[in-house]
Amino acid sequence: MSMPDRSDPAAPKKRLKTLEAEAKEAQRTIDELKARDALKTQFLSNISHDLRTPLAAIITHAEILREGMLGDLNTKQRDSVSGIVNGGQQLLDMIDEILTYVRGASDQVTLARTTFSITEVVDQVRLLNQALAAKKGLTIERLNGEDLPPVHADRDKLKHVLGNLIGNAIKFTPEGGRIWIRFSRRGRNADELVVEVGDTGRGISRGNHELIFREFAQVDASPSRPHHGTGLGLAIARKLVELHYGTIWVESELGKGSRFFFTLPLTATT
Amino acid sequence: MSARILIVEDSPLVTEAFSILFTEAGYEVDTAATVAEAIERGTSEVVDVMILDISLPDGSGLEVLGALRDSGSLPRATLAMTGHNDSESHRKCIEAGCAEVLLKPVPIAELLRQIKRHLQ
């Protein structure tokens, strides 16, 4: 960028013209990027939807076999067919995650708020994850919350956030570790609920605390990474928490476990 | 006489899987891959339960329900199958008269349980 020539009386006008041209160019670029982003969102939505159909056929066929509807299977055969069902289910969860993200990205996610006990929802999510945690010898405990007032939130979305945080804790905590859920309150009238999901896992370095909440981001993105996923889970969790006027963050250090926090207003917010 | 199930689904892969499942579970099975075919099958034979995919090549599966209602051939129960997990699709299906809205793929135990429940 050249400095304006102060001796030339027409210089300010020329400069203004240049700036206007630059602004137009920038706007064109923004519009083009927005159009491409919308196209990407539409593509992800279509492909996610279309992937479900053949997957439905694969899982249904495998379930028919596993349940012995076409004849008895021996143990090895049943284990193998169960592998197909479980693999299909895992793939389906990933597709669902992409669909949820796509809806969030195109602002199609709306909240259906009701008033309910958060401890009840936490206990449901704990129960759902119990078998997976037990396989790794992990415990999932709820440390408090009996005296909490009800929350006014979207129950399913909250379940999604908790399921994601607890699922991550299971994934990244080595055998024999601990996972806990703890509640606290903050704000002038203690009207904000802070939900903590903590673990004794491998932790996250400070430099990555922001990165992990970005879509498609993974701390280890190499093809040989030990944990695979869409890299969308925490981005979705953040979106869902923000829709509730809450915030989400992590406190963690490498090798010292992680504590994820998110807030929810305890009084009704419209 | 065993109950008759009409599978309305445009994916031959899914239709084949469901046909095996329902035949093995002891039901009579009929299939249709388009709205037009579903209306024709649903009016020419008595259908007890219709498994209805919402996205069909020639229109919305919900159009089938309207046409069968008009001709007095509504099945005892219609279970909608959708790949869209959102409250708007769910609401539209229920308003159109579906007894249940199931998200693909439905675990077979759940699907058979729902069919049995609606046949009672």
Image (cartoon, coloured by chain):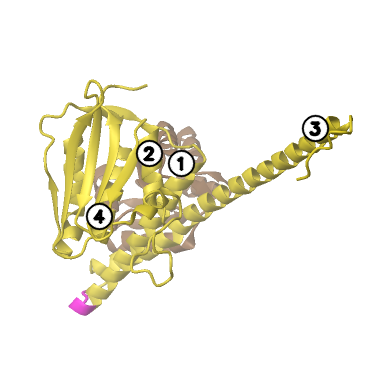
Chain colours: A yellow, B brown
The residue indicated by pointer 1 is A104
Highlighted magenta segment, given as a residue range: A72-76
Q: Earlier in the sequence, mark 1 or mark 3?
A: 3
**Screen quadrant of the C terminus of chain A:** top left
Q: Judging from the image, what secondary structure is the residue with disc 3 in?
A: helix
Quadrant in the picture for residue B98: top left
Q: Judging from the image, what secondary structure is the residue with disc 4 in?
A: helix
Q: Earlier in the sequence, mark 3 or mark 4?
A: 3
> Which disc is residue B39 wearing?
none
* Residue A4, x across and y down, in percent: 80, 37
Mark 2 to mark 1 CA distance (whole Å): 8 Å
* Residue A59, x across and y down, in percent: 35, 63
Chain of the residue under label 1: A
Instruction: Evaluate whether label 4 is on the same chain as label 2.
Output: yes
The residue indicated by pointer 4 is A169
Quadrant in the picture for residue A145: top left
Q: Judging from the image, what secondary structure is the residue with disc 1 in?
A: helix
Chain of the residue under label 2: A
- Considering depth in this image, is B69 or A270 the residue closer to the camera? A270
Mark 3 to mark 4 CA distance (whole Å): 55 Å
Pointer 1 and pointer 3: residues touching (CB < 8 Å)?
Answer: no
Q: Earlier in the sequence, mark 2 or mark 3?
A: 3
Pointer 3 and pointer 4: residues touching (CB < 8 Å)?
Answer: no
Pointer 2 and pointer 1: residues touching (CB < 8 Å)?
Answer: yes
Instruction: Evaluate whether label 1 is on the same chain as label 4.
Output: yes
Q: Judging from the image, what secondary structure is the residue with disc 2 in?
A: helix
Q: Measuring 56% from the left and 52% from the top, which residue is drawn there?
A: A43
How packed mark 1 is, by other alpha carbons closer than 10 Å (few <14, some 14-19, many 20 or more), is some
Instruction: Name the main secondary structure of what is drawn in magenta.
Output: loop
Determine if residue A145 is in view: yes
